[in-house]
């Protein structure tokens, strides 16, 4: 790689760590969970930076370190120290930079660190220097503190939940950075509006109202003259820091355009607050099983939401599977077919693998991390399938107990796709009931479900936010303070990243 640079080809680094981590889960996240990419390998993560692509050729790219973890519990202090230390060392070894793309999620909580992504960006800036233009891309379930907005020059997030636009968003963040560097224009003006609303992701799907309309306004604001990018963050409800809340940021060259755009989006979100509802009908686990059995719709999907590993649940809560196995309807082999995904249990997996498909085993699984709601579950059943080599689960087995097919894994794994089941010799389309630890259904399962409801079950990502017990978030906050007065939704112009951040945090 050349150390020289020309005006035509800016030098841009890529760095970031992404996870959403629940402070209400006893689970902890260690460094390997981030599957970090380093150096040139970082570019392989992004199709729009493949050799020959326009953006790839528009700059000299330098991967530092980018890691993404499945949602989980808090990141340990040791993992944070190791990952950020290496990230900074790698940045320090790069040639002088013009730009940096900060590719994060925005809901990382770390033992002993507050507002982790802003802290990391401050260290990055101390390493690369104040002149570097930083473009930050995030998940809309991330949180934007005033400090994070300050240290970024451009900042944006997804506009769809589920996040079908995740790669498009990253590409937009990179394109805006490349365009800004090419233009030589000054740093954009940033209008930030914190919105005192904290909602579950499952109440804010952009597939349905009111989020559909609230988010439709983003592209209208972005299309305004003088605006470069516009974004609304729902925020992350299962962590308990002052930054956890919704926010809007609009960036661009025109102060008045970005201010009025940000205020319009913030007002739209605030005014819709009473209309956000769960994306599917909800109920208790037992009531929904009753409904599923009485229904003619097949397959009938139930989300076991409280331990959703893709939101930050430990994934090994046994509460749902325990209740399911207690139900008399499923105790005979010819009962209604139920698929249950999933509970980790390394020892149970070993026993089932050693016994082989067709063998009858008695195994105990789950509740090694989160045993607050139910203890380990013991099952006696027939080994239906064994599969090795999964990136997340490593090894998966299916144990059939009566008419329940319980998926057990070595490590926790989200079940989002049809092949996640068919690889285990299970056919969700012909099952009577499919229960998945998930919130809103991912598109393939959503399309397959003849009916779908969400069970409000206990766990680290309990959808009943009030029973979690936040005590550090700012108050008043909707819906915790349901009848609060209208907040100040005027745009705060955040100083450019090379200027001091003055005034009070708010
Ligand atoms: Zn998200």
Image (spheres, helix red, strand yellow):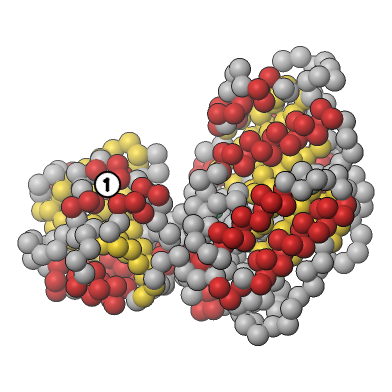
Residue at 19% over, 56% down: 431
Q: Which image quarter holds the N terminus?
A: top right
Residue at 20% over, 48% down: 427
Camera-side residue of 384 and 231: 231
Mark 1 secondary-structure assignment: helix
Q: Is residue 88 at least partly visible in the picture?
A: no
Residue at 29% over, 77% down: 287
Number of other residues with Cα within 10 Å of mark 1, as a class: few under 14, some 14 to 19, many 20 or more: some
Q: Is residue 85 above or below residue 461?
A: above
Question: Residue 275 in the image: x percent, y percent?
Answer: 55, 73
Residue at 21% over, 69% down: 295
Left or right placement of residue 55 versus residue 355 in this view: right
Q: Is residue 409 at least partly visible in the picture?
A: yes
Question: Residue 285 in the image: x percent, y percent?
Answer: 32, 73
Left or right placement of residue 125 versus residue 350 in this view: right
Question: Residue 243 in the image: x percent, y percent?
Answer: 70, 64
């Amino acid at each position: 790689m050349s150390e020289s640079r020309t005006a035509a080809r800016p030098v841009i680094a890529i760095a970031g760590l992404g996870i959403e981590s629940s402070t209400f889960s006893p689970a902890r996240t260690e460094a390997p969970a981030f599957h970090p990419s380093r150096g040139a390998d970082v570019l392989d993560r992004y199709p729009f930076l493949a050799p020959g692509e326009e953006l790839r050729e528009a700059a000299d790219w330098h991967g530092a370190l980018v890691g993404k973890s499945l949602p989980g519990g808090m990141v340990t202090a040791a993992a944070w120290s190791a990952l950020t230390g290496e990230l900074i060392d790698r940045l320090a070894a790069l040639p002088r930079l013009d730009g940096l793309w900060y590719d994060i999620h925005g809901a990382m909580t770390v033992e002993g660190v507050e507002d982790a992504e802003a802290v990391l960006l401050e260290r990055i800036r101390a390493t690369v220097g104040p002149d570097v233009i930083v473009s930050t891309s995030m998940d809309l379930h991330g949180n934007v503190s005033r400090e994070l907005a300050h240290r970024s020059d451009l900042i944006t997030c997804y506009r769809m939940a589920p996040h079908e636009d995740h790669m498009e968003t990253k590409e937009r963040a990179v394109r805006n950075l490349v365009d800004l560097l090419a233009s030589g224009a000054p740093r954009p003006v940033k209008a930030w509006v914190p919105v005192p609303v904290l909602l579950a992701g499952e109440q804010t799907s952009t597939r349905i109202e009111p989020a559909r309309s609230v988010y439709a306004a983003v592209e209208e604001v972005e299309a305004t003259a003088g605006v470069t990018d516009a974004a609304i963050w729902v925020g992350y409800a299962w962590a308990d820091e002052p930054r956890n809340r919704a926010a809007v940021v609009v960036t661009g060259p025109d102060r008045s355009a970005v201010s009025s755009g940000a205020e319009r989006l913030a007002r739209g979100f605030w005014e819709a607050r009473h209309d956000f509802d769960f994306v599917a009908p909800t109920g208790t686990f037992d009531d929904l099983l009753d409904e599923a059995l009485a229904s003619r719709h097949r397959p009938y999907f139930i989300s076991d939401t409280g331990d959703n590993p893709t939101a930050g649940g430990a994934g090994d809560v046994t509460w749902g599977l325990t209740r399911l196995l207690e139900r008399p309807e499923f105790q005979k082999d010819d009962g209604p077919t139920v698929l249950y995904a999933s509970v980790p249990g390394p020892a149970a997996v070993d026993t089932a693998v050693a016994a082989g498909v067709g063998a009858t085993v008695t195994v105990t699984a789950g509740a090694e991390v989160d045993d607050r709601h139910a203890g380990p579950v013991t099952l006696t059943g027939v080994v239906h399938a064994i599969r090795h080599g999964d990136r997340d689960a490593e090894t998966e087995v299916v144990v059939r107990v009566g008419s329940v097919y319980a998926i057990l894994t070595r490590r926790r794994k989200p079940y989002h796709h049809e092949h996640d089941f068919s690889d285990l010799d299970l056919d969700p389309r012909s099952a009577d009931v499919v229960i998945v630890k998930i919130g809103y259904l991912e598109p393939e399962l959503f399309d397959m479900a003849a009916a779908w409801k969400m069970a409000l079950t206990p766990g680290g990502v309990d959808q009943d936010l009030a029973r979690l017990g936040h005590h550090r978030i700012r108050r008043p906050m909707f819906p915790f303070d349901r009848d609060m007065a209208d907040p100040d939704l005027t745009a705060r112009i955040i100083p450019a990243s090379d200027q001091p951040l003055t005034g009070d945090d708010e």
